[in-house]
């Protein structure tokens, strides 16, 4: 029997979102219905609402979520009803060329639930990032669910489903930050702060936070930055070099994703160092760099999709470290709100005064 629950829908470009009744089908083979306990508000949800991602309105928004498995379809073995899970955007296939080479975090053939959730008039919904978790319940593929220690608070756990994982993974997976390294992080929003927390976790000796907003720099210090640079008033490349004995940082993480911040990252990196791009550029952005410098400086210029995470490997580990007090995830939750407050949270996001608003159901 399908069920009717409440969910946050974006009906059209730039239209305020509305809470509507949605229909969640019973899970089919390989699918799971999850009772959502918490879901963070991410820029990507706003991008969907602004028509910046696709025109497949209506969207069921929300994708940084944790909850309890309510029911499972045929053939589901990974999770059972009652399990506490974090949702991820993409169930890996296990069969594509990336999966077969033992690199499932690059899977080129990920999937979501096959059945569609709908409005009560039958109109099919497009769930944000294949999840759609600003809803009392949602339908996903079993591979999108990762069981973690239920001692963690849902509001905190859900954040690992997107931006916070992207930032931590940019440092520990893509950047391979290690003990004693120097790291600079450009842009200290949720993603950049998570990259700072990840660098601290990995044992970085020096963590330089760069932002144009003084308040963001102060919160970066709480997340583990050892030095701060206001790039609105100071040349960040010079400042990072000065803080690293004139050399540049071993790893520089661009958590903004603009040509100018990428260039700063490129030049603020030590010889043979690594640049990690985790901020997401827009289609019109172009990058110009002297190719000889790209060659001559050696090292690695890497992009980090979703922190190159493997949910089954990374989510339980990071939740355990959090529960042991070794990774402060709770500081990413600025406020908890209700399902009806998502539109207001979008406005606050515009003003840049929140790391994460989290809908708690
Ligand atoms: N130089 C330095 N910092 C900047 C610059 C700049 N030119 N422009 C913006 N910032 C800072 C902002 O002041 C803010 O602190 O970058 C931070 C961005 O933070 P958020 O807007 O909260 O974004 P976040 O959720 O961290 O995501 C960062 O990753 O997922 C992508 O689309 C997302 O591209 C975005 C990036
Ligand atoms: Zn997100
Ligand atoms: Zn695959």
Image (cartoon, rainbow, N blue to C red):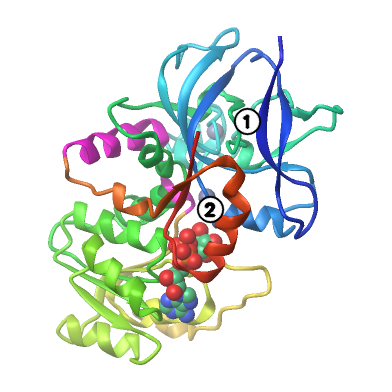
Looking at the image, which is closer to me, 11 or 167? 11
Residue 236 versus residue 332 in the image, above or below: below
What x and y, as percent, mark residue 159?
A: 42, 44
For residue 219, which quarter of the picture? bottom left
Ligand 3 located in image quadrant: top right
Judged by its main secondary structure, the magenta piece is helix
Ligand 3 has an atom within 8 Å of the beta carbon of the residue at disc 1: no
| Side of 139 where 246 appears, left or right | left
Give the camera-side residue of 230 and 4: 4
Image point (44%, 84%), residue name = 292
- Please give left or right for residue 254 compared with residue 198 in the image: right
The residue that appears at 30% across and 47% down in the rendered structure is 330
Residue 322 is covered by the magenta coloring? yes
In the image, is residue 316 above or below residue 200? above
Residue 279 visible (yes or no): no
Q: Is residue 178 visible?
A: yes
Local packing at callout 2 (Cα closer than 10 Å; few below 14, some 14-19, many 20+) is: many
Residue 42: assigned label? 2
Q: Secondary structure at mark 1?
A: loop
* Alpha-carbon span between mark 1 and mark 2: 19 Å
Residue shown at 24% from the left, 85% from the top: 241
Circles 1, 2 touching at the beta carbon (< 8 Å): no
Magenta segment includes 4: no
Q: Secondary structure at mark 2?
A: loop
Residue behind label 2 places its C-beta within 8 angstroms of ligand 2: yes
Q: Which residues are magenta?
A: 305-324
Q: Nearer the viewer, residue 282 or 274?
A: 282
The quarter of the picture where residue 339 lies is: top right
Residue 3 image position (x, y, % from top left): 69, 17
Q: Is residue 167 left or right of residue 123?
A: left
């Amino acid at each position: 029997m399908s069920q009717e629950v409440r969910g946050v829908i974006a009906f059209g470009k730039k239209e305020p979102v509305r809470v509507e009744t949605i229909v969640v089908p019973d899970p089919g083979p390989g699918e799971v219905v999850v009772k959502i306990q918490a879901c963070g508000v991410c820029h990507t949800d706003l991008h969907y609402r602004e028509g910046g991602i696709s025109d497949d309105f209506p969207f069921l928004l929300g994708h940084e979520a944790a909850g309890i498995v309510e029911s499972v379809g045929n053939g589901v073995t990974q999770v059972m009803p009652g399990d506490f899970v974090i949702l991820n955007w993409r169930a890996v296939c296990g069969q594509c060329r990336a999966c077969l080479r033992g690199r499932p975090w690059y899977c080129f053939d990920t999937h979501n639930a096959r059945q569609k959730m709908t409005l009560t008039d039958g109109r099919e919904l497009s769930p944000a990032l294949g999840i759609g978790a600003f809803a009392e319940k949602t339908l996903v593929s079993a591979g999108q669910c990762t069981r973690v220690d239920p001692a963690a608070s849902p509001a905190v756990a859900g954040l690992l489903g997107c931006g916070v994982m992207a930032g931590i993974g940019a440092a520990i997976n893509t950047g391979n930050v290690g003990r004693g390294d120097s790291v600079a992080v450009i842009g200290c929003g949720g993603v950049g702060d998570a990259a700072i927390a990840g660098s601290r976790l990995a044992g970085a000796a020096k963590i330089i936070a760069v932002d144009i907003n003084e308040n963001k720099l102060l919160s970066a210090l709480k997340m583990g930055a050892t030095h701060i640079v206001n790039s609105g008033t100071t040349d960040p490349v010079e400042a990072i070099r000065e803080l690293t004995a004139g050399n540049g940082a071993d790893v520089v993480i661009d958590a903004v994703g603009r040509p100018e911040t990428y260039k700063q990252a490129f030049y603020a990196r030590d010889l043979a160092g690594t640049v990690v791009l985790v901020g997401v550029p827009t289609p019109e952005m172009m990058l110009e760099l002297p190719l000889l410098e790209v060659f001559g400086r050696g090292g690695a210029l890497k992009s980090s999709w979703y922190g190159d995470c493997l949910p089954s490997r990374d989510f339980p580990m990071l939740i355990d470290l959090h529960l042991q007090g070794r990774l402060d995830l709770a500081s990413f939750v600025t406020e908890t709100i209700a399902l009806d407050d998502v539109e207001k949270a979008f406005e606050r996001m515009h003003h840049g005064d929140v790391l994460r608003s989290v809908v708690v159901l």
